[in-house]
């Protein structure tokens, strides 16, 4: 069995970076930027007022100035302002030539076209210099995941469209005679396909275009038929049929179609019978069927793999450190990802860790990560975890 990191390295080296496409800003949220987004303008493009008030050259308390015009956002005052004069100005408006300061309107008394500066007037300039936010040539650097904040900035930079990674096309296949879809009536020896739906959401959230294929039954023929539907998928993911039982036929069926297997079995818990390779033009990852194992492997392996395919750095899920709130026993020989609940106080590791328990997974928001043979830990110890 190989380690989690070795398995990840194999996955990264099997993967290929996807092509790019250019999309309008309204479709760019959460996509991976692949070409730097460069500003063609300064923001603000002119010295701008930060407040509503009066643009003046210099003014002292009790000075009386004559208002000679107005500058509003989108409507600059054409002339310049001289000593003894003021221009009525509004937030975001161009500061007229000659002005050195904005006196906020709360700090003046106005009478007709005369203003008088009140005692203790605020002396800050309230002028934003041209290019104060960013200058022409400023760039958002690829690769990066585009956030709502980035989109606001890109729009301000006057980038109407951006070059992003194509979405990885993922074909998701559940396998097993026992499975029916939610809403169907299961037979007495059947259960509902579940982690399929969890994985669909997880991988879509990571940026993939995920297609659910029909459930494959536990025969080579059925598995090969469904594997024949993957079309132009970049990544084929099977769930179940990965272990050693008589009905675990996924690898055999895929090999019959040309799978070149890279590895099988990883020293982790849950998730040991993970398998991966290349299936003709696609990558293939065979996830274990136990629902929590499939979801944990999705988080630990498939999400980082999708990131790498979209051009983000090939890296494991980031680990954090947190305070353990309850005692936990010694770990066995496999790296253990234990469902846990993270609060501001720390991490409470769930008592029950059977990989069939989706209710425990749903109540968890983190996985405590235990190294192989990690000794027993006490409440108050610091341990590593990842968020889920
Ligand atoms: N003798 C051994 N038995 C098992 C071993 C082993 O090393 N030796 N490994 C165990 C581990 S660890 C895991 S994990 C499971 C994985 O088995 P498979 O990948 O072959 O999965 P299945 O047998 O097809 O299913 C296991 C379990 O999960 C349910 N399942 C499968 N797909 C779905 C789905 N889409 N939605 C919901 N539930 C699903 C299935 O009904 C089974 O209950 O093997 C252990 N056994
Ligand atoms: O590794 Mo299995 O995935 O423990 O249940």
Image (tube, rainbow, N blue to C red):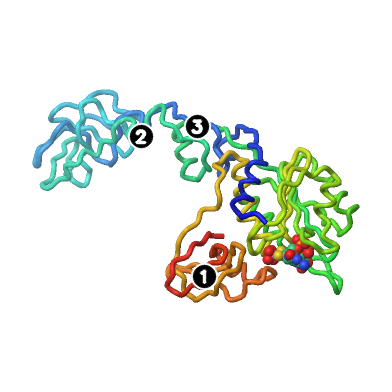
Mark 1 Cα-neighbour bin, 10 Å: few <14, some 14–19, many ≥20: few
Left or right placement of residue 303 versus residue 230 in this view: left
At 24% from the left edge and 25% from the top edge, which residue is drawn?
Answer: 97
Q: Nearer the viewer, residue 195 or 13?
A: 13
- Tell me the SS state at disc 2: loop
Relative vertical location of residue 319 with respect to residue 47 in this rendering, above or below: below
- Cα–Cα span, label 1 and label 3: 47 Å
Q: Quadrant of the N terminus?
A: bottom right
Q: Residues within 10 Å of mark 3 (few under 14, many from 20)?
A: some
Residue 375, which numbered label? 1
The nearer-to-camera label among 1 and 3 is: 1
Disc 3 to disc 2: CB gap under 8 Å: no
Q: Which residue is mark 3?
A: 36
| Horizontal arrangement in the rendering, residue 73 relative to residue 224 (left or right) | left
What is the x, y in percent for residue 238?
A: 76, 53
Disc nearest the viewer among 1 and 2:
1
Q: Kindly identify the residue that appears in the image at 32 percent across and 29 percent down.
A: 46
Residue 199: where, in percent of width, then height?
Answer: 68, 56
Q: Is mark 1 within 8 Å of ligand 2?
A: no
Alpha carbon separation for disc pair 1 and 2: 66 Å
Which quadrant holds the C terminus?
bottom right
Query: Pointer 2: what residue?
Result: 73
- Compared to residue 216, the image places residue 18 above or below, namely above
Q: Earlier in the sequence, mark 3 or mark 2?
A: 3
Mark 3: which secondary structure? Answer: loop
């Amino acid at each position: 069995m190989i380690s989690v990191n070795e398995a990840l390295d194999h996955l990264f080296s099997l993967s290929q970076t996807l092509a790019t496409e250019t999309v309008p800003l309204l479709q760019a949220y959460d996509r991976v930027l692949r070409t730097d987004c460069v500003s063609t303008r300064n923001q603000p493009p002119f010295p701008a007022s930060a407040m509503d008030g009066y643009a003046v050259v210099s003014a002292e308390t009790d000075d009386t100035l004559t208002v000679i015009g107005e500058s509003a956002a989108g409507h600059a005052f054409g002339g310049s302002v001289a000593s003894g004069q003021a221009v009525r100005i509004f937030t975001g408006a161009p500061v007229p030539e000659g002005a050195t300061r904005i006196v906020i309107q709360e700090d003046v008394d106005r009478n007709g076209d005369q203003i008088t500066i009140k005692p203790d007037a605020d002396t800050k300039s309230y002028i934003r210099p041209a290019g104060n936010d960013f200058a022409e040539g400023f760039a958002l650097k690829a690769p990066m995941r585009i956030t709502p904040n980035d989109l606001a900035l890109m729009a301000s930079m006057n980038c109407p469209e951006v070059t992003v990674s194509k979405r990885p096309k993922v074909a998701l296949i559940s396998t097993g005679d026992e499975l029916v879809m939610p809403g169907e009536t299961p037979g007495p020896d059947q259960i509902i396909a579940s982690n399929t739906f969890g994985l669909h959401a997880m991988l879509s959230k990571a940026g993939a275009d995920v297609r659910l294929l029909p459930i494959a039954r536990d025969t080579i023929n059925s598995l090969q038929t469904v594997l024949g539907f993957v079309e132009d998928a970049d990544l084929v993911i099977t769930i179940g049929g990965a272990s050693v039982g008589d009905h675990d036929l996924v690898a055999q069926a895929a090999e019959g179609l040309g799978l070149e297997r890279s590895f099988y079995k990883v020293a982790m818990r849950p998730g040991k019978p993970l398998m991966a390779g290349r299936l003709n033009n696609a990558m293939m990852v065979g996830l274990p069927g136990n629902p929590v194992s499939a979801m944990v492997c999705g988080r630990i392996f498939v999400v980082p793999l999708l990131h790498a395919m979209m051009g983000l750095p090939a890296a494991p899920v980031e680990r954090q450190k947190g305070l353990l709130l309850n005692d936990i026993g010694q770990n066995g020989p496999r790296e253990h990802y234990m469902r846990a609940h993270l609060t501001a106080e720390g991490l409470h590791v769930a008592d029950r860790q059977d990989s069939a328990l989706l209710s425990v997974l749903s109540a968890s928001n983190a996985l405590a990560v235990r190294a192989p043979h990690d000794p027993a830990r006490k409440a108050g110890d610091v341990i590593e975890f990842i968020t889920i």
